[in-house]
Image (cartoon, grey):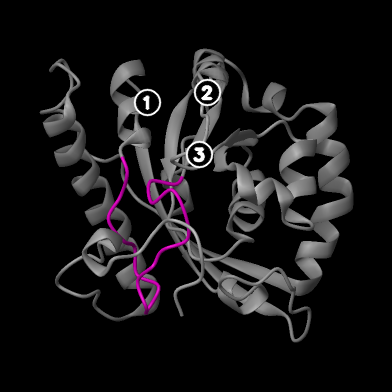
Amino acid sequence: MVSPHTEKTASFRTLAAVLVPFLSAIAKIEYTDADKLPREGAFVLSPNHYSNIDPVIMGWSIWKLGRAPRFLAKASLFRVPVVGAVLRATGQIPVERAGSVRGSEPLKAANSLADNGNVVIIYPEGTLTRDPQMWPMKGKTGAVRMALEHDLPLVPAAHWGTQAVMARYSNKLSLFPRKTIKVAFGDPVDLAEFRGQPINAAVLTAATARVMDDITALLEKLRAESAPAERWNPAAHNQKETGRFE
């Protein structure tokens, strides 16, 4: 098992010395149930996703709680100013969109991180939510697959407020006034009934729906409102994974 302290490599610490004061100047984080984030050992963390700056803010949140974040993130994020620089500097893992040549390297890199006791952050939506009100949409199965294949806890998370720092589909930062971002962590998703079963499409779909339910419940508390009864499914609205949908 890797100590949380050995996760924080020299590159992470150097980046944090530059980035954390800047982030602290433009935003503050209010935590809910921060004690539910495991302080050691490998696990999968699955947050909601609606702004290009989400990985930076979530990474900062986790860093403040003592862990060093590693992401499986869509490759296009690595081309976003500020966000891409941060992802590359800390050895994050780019994953190409559907329809691109994915290869096995992202999975190998994620497996290595898990084997070394690291936090592996996987956005189950795979891209910015297409829900018009920015509620979590239908999830993909990568986070669940990794949790089941490696017998890892899968911790749900939700945040609200990053859209005030960087609007959805935008690459421009809003620096003033200082924003408040709310971040909540949940108990590990109950995947007991799926563990030990053959990992097939039915298992992955059912388990992913449970993950999305837990993430949505966390976000409902942060927003103090109820999500739509039916989760947004881009395919049902003739939406592709790329492009802007506002």
Does residue 204 lie above or below 105 as drawn? below
Residue at x-position 84% and y-position 60%: 21
198 horizontally vs 17: left or right: left
Residue 206 in view, yes or no: yes
Q: Could you tell me which residue is drawn at 21 percent across and 33 percent down?
A: 204
Residue 84 at x, y = what percent? 74, 48
Residue type at mark 3: give it.
Ile
Q: Toward the viewer: 171 or 212?
A: 171
Kind of residue indicated by mark 1: Met
Q: Which residue is mark 2?
A: 110
Is disc 2 in contact with disc 1, using a CB cutoff of under 8 Å? yes
Give the magenta part as a residue range: 123-140
Asked whether the beta carbons under mark 3 and mark 2 sit within 8 Å of each other, the answer is: no
> For the residue labelled by badge 3, is the local secondary structure a helix, a strand or a loop?
strand
Tell me, yes or no, whether the highlighted magenta stretch contains residue 67: no
Q: Is residue 128 magenta?
A: yes
The x and y percentages for residue 181 are 57, 71
Question: Is residue 39 visible in this depiction of the protein?
Answer: no
Residue matched to label 1: 146
What secondary structure is found at the residue carrying circle 2? helix
Closer to the chain start, of discs 3 and 2, is 2
Q: Which mark is residue 201?
A: none
Comes first in the chain, label 2 or label 1: 2
Residue at (49, 42) in percent of width and height: 97
Q: Nearer the viewer, residue 127 or 28?
A: 127
How many other residues sit within 10 Å of disc 2, few (<14), some (14-19) or many (≥20)?
many
Could you give the CA–CA distance between mark 1 and mark 3, rounded to whole angstroms?
11 Å
Q: Quadrant of residue 98?
A: top left
